[in-house]
Image (cartoon, rainbow, N blue to C red):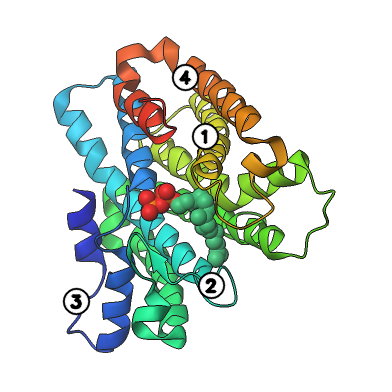
Amino acid sequence: MIDTALDAAIPSSDTHPELLHKAMRYGVFPGGKRIRPLLVLSTAMMVERVRRGDSARLRQILERGIPPAVAIELMHSYSLIHDDLPSMDNDDFRRGLPTVHKAFGEAEAILAGDALLSLAFEVVSKEEAYELMGSLTSVKIAYELASASGSLGMVGGQVMDISPVHCDIGVEYTEKMSDLKTGALMKAAIRCGAIVAGASSNELKILTRFGELFGRAFQVRDDILDFHEEGLLTFSRVLGVEKAELYCSSLFSSAIDILKPYEKQAEELLWLTTGALGFG
Ligand code: GRG
């Protein structure tokens, strides 16, 4: 569902300007794990099940969740394209393929990222989307995306990551950086799922806390897996791999504890959390 909707959202490779659309598609397909859109949809299903949860309603909720799910993956794809650029991480490969700037040139990669970011907002605010989600929900989703990705969110975290660091930088800095760079978009994915399914303010609060724990644990897990990569600001470096593993387990347990009262109603979210955080 997610890939079909992503494919429909991005202009075809033979639409002018062809090279730009090819580069945008190259950054999105075949893609990675699609964790953020899965977070949107799994959270929306949980909230709907708590409310009523008959299968017709669940199908409707999944449909409503598609615009935010697509938008968040477009935003994630833009961030990875820009993160790989020579002025940032300077990576030649991503997901086993040459990075977008290696395949299409730096200027085209910058512009493909820019266009994917704009497209994310187009997807959640066009008529089709606000008719499906309701116009107030559409505005709320746009706000979640904007605030999570800006200077107080993902871009702010990226700035912390690339700024010259001192050797005494510790856990607190790494936590703040990770919460912004990686966590903000994950938390937004969960909040978007909750909002699109009409969560109460208490449910939104609970799920926001879950999102914070998920995002932090995801970054700790990623740092443990990437231990051998260059870079000072990773949890496995500031804590040591053993402590980082314990930290990841404790964040995972706290996240699961939040979902436990929901049991079967949170089935997909429990499955996704266990797998994505490496406890499957
Ligand atoms: C350039 C504005 C800007 C932001 C970049 C997200 C990010 C900020 C940088 C990515 C650097 C990185 C590898 C961070 C570790 C956590 C992370 C976001 C990993 C990649 O996410 P996955 O595992 O990727 O969901 P896939 O390939 O599955 O889509």
The residue at which mark 2 appears reads as: 90
Q: Mark 4 touching mark 3, by CB under 8 A?
A: no
Q: Mark 2 touching mark 1, by CB under 8 A?
A: no
Disc 3 is placed on an element classified as loop
Q: Mark 2 touching mark 3, by CB under 8 A?
A: no
In the rendering, at what x and y percent does residue 73 appear? 37, 55
Q: From the viewer's perspective, is the residue at label 2 or at label 4 nearer?
A: 2
Disc 1 is placed on an element classified as helix
Distance of label 2 from label 4 (alpha carbons):
36 Å
Q: Mark 4 touching mark 1, by CB under 8 A?
A: no
Which circle's residue, 4 or 1, is located before the other in the chain? 1
Which circle's residue, 2 or 4, is located before the other in the chain? 2
In the rendering, at what x and y percent does residue 258 appear? 50, 18
> Which label number is shown at residue 256?
4
> Which label number is shown at residue 12?
3
Which circle's residue, 2 or 1, is located before the other in the chain? 2
Q: Can you tell which quarter of the image residue 64 is in?
A: top left
Evaluate whether residue 47 shows in this view: no
Disc 4 is placed on an element classified as helix
Q: From the viewer's perspective, is the residue at label 4 or at label 3 nearer?
A: 4
